[in-house]
Amino acid sequence: MALQEYECPACGGAMEFNPHTQKLKCPYCDSEFDVKDYVANHNSSSQGEAVEKPSSEENASSGEQLYVYSCGSCGGEILATESLGSTKCPFCNNNIVVKEKFTGEFKPDYIIPFQKTKEDAVEIYRNYVKSKRLVPSVFLEENHIDEIKGVYVPFWLFDGKESFNGQYEATKIRTWSDAAYNYRETKYYSVSRAGTESFEKVPCDGSKEMPDDLMESLEPFDHSKMVPFNMGYLAGFFANKYNVGALECKAHALKRMDVTTAADFRNTISGYTSVMPVSEHCGTVTSSHKYALYPVYMLSTTWNNNNYIFAMNGQNGRFVGDLPFSIKQALKYYIPIGLIASVVGFICMYLFR
Ligand SMILES: [Zn+2]
Ligand SMILES: [Zn+2]
């Protein structure tokens, strides 16, 4: 296994990718390099060899086997899970990438580089917590962030063309009256819809560790900022290689396309009193996939012995997660509203008796 390091050509310090300038920056001498140029010029001179060997320890949280790498710069032992390919040396803070995790069959086609820094993420987290009314006030006052990690999460992006065929029974109802009778006329229609709909870059999380629903709530990512993969973007961030294959993800992605296709065709039926589906069929005409890395900040915080996990879209700052719930705050906000509503209800009842 070859380790890629990001040694500064000027001073030898460990360079990091800077989300604001989109360049590699040396924090020691402030030199900046274009990601493409850096890797092209210094690829060969800045790598150390490392042996991947199973460690006797296991990752306590997931039970996953851990691997040991030895840092090319200080010789320290780096522990990592099998899928983790980009990390930091805990001893010398060197940013390293295990090349084999991102080359050959594991080479991503694209990457969306981080656009938010760690500091941005902390600030967004604070504002998010403040904006939630039902969070206990002590929680707001204290600093609870245990850990914040910028992680590139592997995603499969599916392109596809879905065919659709739907039959519906629809009605139009007209009512009118004359002096003697009320009339009601019901017209029945047989409605058909058929065609195809094309999709581009429907994402599907290719990592076992990341909960799918959490990742889906971070969408959308802006694909216009997606660039061809380059290892330089990983400097200073964690990155996982995929451990859920494209085939496993495909069914899930096609299902998402089917649901959207059916809804889009159904929405073209209008002007009826009622519409009942008789049959709806979706089929895949063509599909293909690409492999990409998406930027996500993971924050964990502990409060009252509970662990809370948050995730943030590293591109636009969209934030998701659970926060502790305070009964006291709920009473403060909801009781007065509840009380007013029941008083109004009571007055109405009294008036209309
Ligand atoms: Zn430097
Ligand atoms: Zn080291």
Image: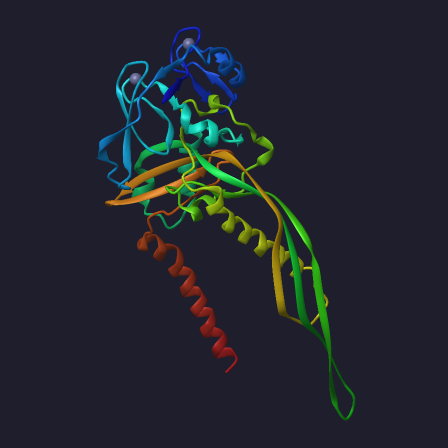
User: Vertically, is 306 above or below 344?
Assistant: above
Q: Quadrant of residue 85?
A: top left
Q: Nearer the viewer, residue 271 or 327?
A: 271
Q: Nearer the viewer, residue 156 or 25?
A: 156
* Residue at the outermost bottom position: 180
- State ligand 1's quadrant: top left
User: Vertically, is 128 above or below 21?
Assistant: below
Q: Is residue 35 left or right of residue 260?
A: left
Say whether residue 217 is visible: no
**Residue 237 location in percent, x, y?**
41, 27
**Residue 182 location in percent, x, y?**
73, 88
Q: Is residue 245 left or right of residue 254?
A: left
Residue drawn at x 67%, y 69% as measured from the top left: 168
Residue drawn at x 41%, y 23% as measured from the top left: 99
Q: Quadrant of residue 187?
A: bottom right
User: Vertically, is 278 above or below 225?
Assistant: below
Residue drawn at x 43%, y 47% as measured from the top left: 212
Say whether residue 139 is visible: yes
**Residue 271 location in percent, x, y?**
73, 67
